[in-house]
């Protein structure tokens, strides 16, 4: 089964991370490298990536055939998507075990969502 592990942060948590001493920031990044290496070794990681800061976001909408874009995320959003892992796991419980190793799980929000099987909607 495939699962998307979504990692969220917010401007306050980002500021806390950036204010940490260099060695603490390096330790946090090392935790990600270790998790990536573990998941590469087990073959469970399909892909993972941090995302650019939300202020670099472009939202796209199409109405009446016209494409419209707006800058940045919705202002009222408290948590913003910061990165993700796409996993191939035997169970949702295993995906949760992996998500618990994401550093943000100890102070922020990490979501595990199964990918939808669209074959159920096909004729």
Image (spheres, rainbow, N blue to C red):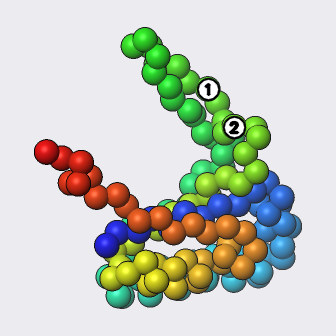
Which of the labelled discs sits on residue 110, or is there none? none
Within 10 Å of disc 1 (Cα), the crowding (few <14, some 14-19, many 20+) is: few
Residue 98 seen in this snapshot: no
Q: Nearer the viewer, residue 117 or 67?
A: 117
Percent across and percent down for residue 97 are 52, 85
Within 10 Å of disc 2 (Cα), the crowding (few <14, some 14-19, many 20+) is: few
Q: Is residue 12 above or below residue 91?
A: above
In the picture of the structure, the residue carrying the numbered disc 1 is: 70
Percent across and percent down for residue 45 are 38, 75
In the picture of the structure, the residue carrying the numbered disc 2 is: 74
Q: Viewed as shown, does residue 50 lie left or right of 25?
A: left
Residue 63 seen in this snapshot: yes
- Please identify, in this view, whether the residue under mark 1 or under mark 2 is nearer the observer: 2
Instruction: Identify which residue is drawn at 83% across, 58% down.
Output: 12
How many numbered marks have been drawn onto this rendered protein structure?
2
Are discs 1 and 2 less than 8 Å apart at CB? no
Q: Quadrant of residue 58?
A: top right
Cα–Cα span, label 1 and label 2: 10 Å
Q: Nearer the viewer, residue 28 or 77?
A: 77
Q: Nearer the viewer, residue 94 or 22?
A: 94
**SS at badge 1:** strand
Q: In the picture, which quadrant includes the C terminus?
A: top left
Percent across and percent down for residue 73 are 66, 39
Q: Viewed as shown, does residue 41 lie left or right of 38?
A: left
Percent across and percent down for residue 50 are 56, 61
Instruction: Identify which residue is drawn at 61% across, 69% down.
Output: 110
Q: In the picture, which quadrant includes the N terminus?
A: bottom left
Q: Is residue 22 above or below residue 117?
A: below
Instruction: Identify which residue is drawn at 75% across, 38% down.
Output: 75
**SS at badge 2:** loop
Q: Is residue 77 above or below residue 21?
A: above
- Return the residue found at the far left: 123
């Amino acid at each position: 089964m495939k699962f998307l592990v979504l990692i969220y942060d917010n401007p306050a948590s980002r500021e806390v991370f950036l204010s940490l001493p260099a060695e603490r920031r390096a330790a946090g990044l090392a935790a990600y490298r270790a998790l990536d290496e573990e998941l590469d070794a087990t073959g469970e990681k399909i892909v993972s990536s941090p995302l650019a800061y939300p202020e670099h976001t472009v939202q796209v909408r199409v109405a009446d055939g016209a494409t419209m874009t707006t800058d940045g995320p919705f202002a009222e959003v408290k948590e913003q998507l910061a990165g993700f892992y796409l996993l191939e796991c035997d169970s949702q419980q295993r995906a949760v075990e992996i998500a618990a190793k994401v550093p943000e799980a100890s102070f922020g929000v990490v979501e595990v969502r199964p990918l939808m099987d669209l074959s159920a909607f096909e004729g």
